[in-house]
Image (tube, rainbow, N blue to C red):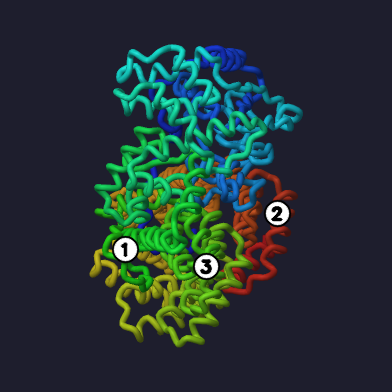
């Protein structure tokens, strides 16, 4: 049982248990009112119709759709034991809305689907999502949807789930096709608006006149967002008469035209309240608020905010505390903040109106540089063997995030994944091409481990175009290679080959032997995956020669072992074994446990093919023991399958069946369908050894079906040949003959020695 393996960095451990996502943002502190609306939502939940339920909460901007939805979601989360999913669709942001495929990918990951198992095609991704949701009782909140098309692919379609959508529009199409219910939020009743003002100010100004509170509520158009901001302003000035505060609000000129609404009275109220609160901010806090409008997204960290203002992290944190206290931004986690979309639009407008273009450009440069330098530091932790991108020096006042180790670096990448993609797009769109391609190159190390292929391909394409605009050929080669890896991981193999060829052409044009060797190694792995064995061997040989010429002690043995895999597939055992043994020695000298375990797997295969069954069993057991020491399901699942093969050859079919079964279960958990099918095929052979032919047939059918879905003609032919053997044992000779004929047809394009041997065996029957 074989399959190319090559790790650029050790993948983190994967848990075998099914995760329970808990993605709801923090509940709003001090939520009041909306009793009737909450009761209506409770009634919908109690009905539990046979189909999945969809509720669309609609209302004007600032009316409290998100606050109500999240408050209610937190209150009922115990009724959804399988978890809660949340996505802000950014339907009303200045930037493009989030594509459904991006949300599907994140949801599938949160539901425990490994990157390798997530389809590239959006429709297939939606189908996989619906399959994952089947039988689960999950609450899904889709915030700020502007169109039904954003929502439809995210609907689970199975009973047990509840989807709550917030939107400024009714999204009537969801009612017609999906039977969605609607809950429309109006502005608060006058007394409820006064109650909200009192709830916020009660501890600071208990003597306010009810009539004046009513007047303030009317000035705020009874919109919860405006009311909370106004109330915080009043609470912050406990000795100032409320009438004076009201007069200040009346006098604020409406400088902001970013908000448009069908109700001009509501729009004017929000504009006035925002301007009133903004003018009351200290100068440095107001500057921070404006600068935050320049950030590429509405969510940001303390470090990114400090880079925008260049006033240091500690001072920025204190300023952010002040903005949180006045409800100008929301804190969603330690050192992490989010804008309401209206406040972000207001901040953008203030930055345009009050700052010199040069000041805004400098702020953007600082925050882009902060992301690039922090991502570079994180890459150095998670993939120290990867080439580093030469970066320009940082401004002295910009402090990259401090990342202590690999775990902290991976966590930073995961938290910032959406921002990093947006930052790359923004940099390219605004002409900061160098930052765009640098970030795209640096992100490759993270993408190789987590494989978020939607972001990987999109970011790399943006970075490639930016590198072309800047005329940087080295960067273009790096990004063609990154696209080759990304397309390979997403099973788009023709596109992958095209990108590798483009990278090779540039590497050779530049006279870059190290880069050429890396690209050849990637291309060889692609060829090996497609069972283009002679092409794979040629690519690995050339890469190995180049690395040896460079005295590269890390990459040379890795490529040599990849070459051994190609030689082994070509049945050139005398050539493969010395390569594996030399690699094994090099890996042990450098304490590369991953490389060591993979070399042991290959050595066990060679020993089997050359009649040394006892040695093969011992070697395979060493590999599995090493995987257990590493606490790595990725290694354990792959190397267990070889142990099963060695156990069969040594005459221990019961032990082999157990190893294959365990390997298949692990691979299913990891989402590697190809290796899962290989394990089931091995289990079928073990069953046939145990004279359990019917069971064997079932295993082989399962394996052949998966290989067919994946377009793997070679492995389907192998599985069909084993199925024919099992059917012969059950007396199904006619079916066996049919499967042998199909296997022979599949082998037509393969000319290597193993294919010839299989062809002869199938012909003999």
Q: Inspect this view and state whether residue 184 appears.
A: yes
Q: Residues within 10 Å of mark 1 (few under 14, many from 20)?
A: some
Decide: marks 3, 2 in contact (CB < 8 A)? no
Q: Is residue 143 left or right of residue 724?
A: left
Q: Is residue 315 left or right of residue 260?
A: left
Locate residue 195: give its quadrant: top left
Decide: marks 3, 1 in contact (CB < 8 A)? no
Q: Residues within 10 Å of mark 3 (few under 14, many from 20)?
A: few
Residue 739 is marked as 2
Depth check, front residue: 444 or 745: 444
Q: Which residue is mark 1?
A: 380
Q: Inspect this view and state whether residue 16 appears.
A: no
Disc 3 to disc 1, how far (Cα)? Answer: 27 Å
Depth check, front residue: 209 or 544: 209
Residue found 34% across the figure and 13% down from its top: 207
Which circle's residue, 3 or 2, is located before the other in the chain? 3
Depth check, front residue: 473 or 407: 473
Residue found 51% across the figure and 26% down from its top: 220
Q: Secondary structure at mark 3?
A: loop
Which circle's residue, 2 or 1, is located before the other in the chain? 1
Position in image of residue 697 (x %, y %): 61, 45
Residue 431 is marked as 3
Disc 3 to disc 2, how far (Cα)? Answer: 58 Å
Position in image of residue 227 (x %, y %): 47, 25
């Amino acid at each position: 049982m074989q399959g190319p393996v090559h790790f650029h960095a050790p993948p983190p451990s994967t848990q075998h248990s099914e995760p329970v996502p808990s993605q709801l943002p923090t509940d709003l502190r001090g939520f009041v009112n909306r009793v009737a609306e909450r009761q209506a939502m409770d009634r919908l939940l109690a009905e539990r119709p046979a189909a999945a339920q969809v509720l669309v909460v609609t209302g004007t901007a600032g009316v409290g759709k998100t606050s109500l939805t999240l408050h209610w979601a937190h209150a009922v989360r115990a009724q959804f034991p399988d978890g809660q999913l949340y996505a802000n669709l950014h339907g009303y942001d200045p930037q493009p809305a989030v594509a459904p495929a991006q949300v599907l990918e994140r949801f599938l990951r949160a539901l425990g689907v490994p990157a390798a198992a997530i389809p590239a095609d959006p429709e297939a991704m939606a189908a996989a999502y619906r399959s994952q949701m089947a039988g689960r009782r999950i609450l899904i909140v889709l915030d700020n949807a502007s169109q039904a098309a954003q929502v439809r692919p995210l609907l689970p379609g199975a009973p047990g789930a509840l989807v709550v959508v917030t939107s400024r529009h009714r999204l009537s199409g969801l009612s017609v096709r999906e039977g969605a219910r609607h809950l429309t939020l109006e502005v608060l009743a006058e007394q409820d608006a006064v109650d909200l003002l009192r709830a916020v100010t009660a501890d600071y100004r208990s003597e306010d006149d009810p009539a004046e509170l009513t007047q303030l509520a009317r000035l705020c158009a009874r919109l919860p967002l405006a009311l909370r901001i106004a109330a915080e302003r009043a609470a912050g000035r406990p000795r100032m008469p409320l009438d004076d505060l009201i007069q200040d609000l009346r006098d604020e000129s409406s400088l902001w035209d970013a908000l448009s609404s069908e109700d001009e009275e509501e729009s004017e109220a929000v504009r006035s309240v925002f301007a009133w609160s903004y003018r009351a901010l200290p100068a440095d806090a107001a500057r921070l608020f404006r600068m935050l409008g320049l950030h590429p997204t509405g969510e940001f960290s303390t470090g990114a905010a400090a880079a925008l203002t260049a006033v240091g992290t500690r001072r920025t944190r204190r300023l952010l505390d002040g903005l949180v206290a006045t409800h100008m931004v929301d804190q969603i986690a330690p050192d992490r903040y989010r804008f309401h979309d209206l406040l972000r639009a207001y901040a953008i407008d203030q930055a345009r109106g009050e700052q010199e273009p040069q000041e805004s450009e400098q702020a953007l440069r600082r925050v882009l540089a902060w992301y690039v330098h922090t991502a570079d530091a994180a890459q150095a932790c998670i993939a120290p063997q990867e080439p580093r991108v030469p970066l320009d020096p940082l401004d002295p006042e910009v402090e990259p995030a401090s990342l202590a180790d690999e775990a902290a670096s991976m966590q930073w990448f995961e938290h910032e994944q959406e921002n990093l993609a947006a930052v790359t797009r923004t940099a390219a769109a605004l002409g900061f091409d160098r930052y765009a391609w640098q970030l795209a190159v640096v992100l490759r190390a993270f993408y190789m481990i987590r494989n978020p292929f939607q972001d990987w391909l999109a970011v790399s394409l943006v970075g490639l175009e930016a590198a072309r605009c800047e005329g940087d050929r080295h960067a273009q080669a790096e990004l063609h290679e990154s696209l080759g890896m990304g397309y390979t991981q997403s099973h788009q193999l023709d596109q992958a080959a095209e990108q590798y060829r483009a990278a090779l052409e540039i590497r050779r044009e530049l006279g870059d032997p190290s880069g050429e060797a890396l690209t050849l190694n990637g291309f060889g792995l692609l060829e090996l995956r497609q069972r283009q064995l002679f092409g794979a061997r040629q690519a690995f040989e050339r890469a190995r020669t180049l690395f040896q010429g460079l005295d590269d002690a890390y990459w040379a043995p890795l490529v040599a072992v990849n070459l051994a895999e190609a030689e082994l597939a070509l049945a050139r055992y005398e050539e493969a074994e010395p390569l594996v043994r030399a690699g094994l020695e090099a890996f042990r000298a450098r304490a590369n446990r991953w490389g060591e375990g993979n070399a042991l797997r290959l050595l066990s295969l060679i020993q089997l093919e050359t009649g040394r069954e006892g040695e093969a069993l011992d070697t395979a057991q060493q590999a599995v023991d090493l995987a257990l020491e590493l606490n790595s399901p990725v290694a354990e699942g792959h190397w267990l399958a070889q142990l099963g093969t060695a156990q069969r050859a040594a005459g221990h079919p019961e032990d082999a069946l157990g190893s294959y079964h365990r390997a298949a279960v692990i691979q299913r958990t990891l989402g590697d369908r190809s290796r899962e099918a290989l394990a089931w095929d091995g289990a079928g052979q073990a069953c046939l050894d145990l004279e359990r032919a019917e069971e064997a047939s079932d295993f082989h059918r399962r394996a052949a079906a998966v290989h067919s879905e994946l377009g793997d003609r070679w492995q389907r032919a192998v599985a069909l040949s084993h199925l024919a053997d099992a059917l012969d044992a059950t007396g199904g000779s006619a079916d066996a003959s049919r499967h042998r004929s199909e296997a022979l047809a599949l082998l037509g394009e393969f000319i290597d020695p193993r294919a010839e041997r299989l062809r002869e065996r199938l012909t003999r029957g």
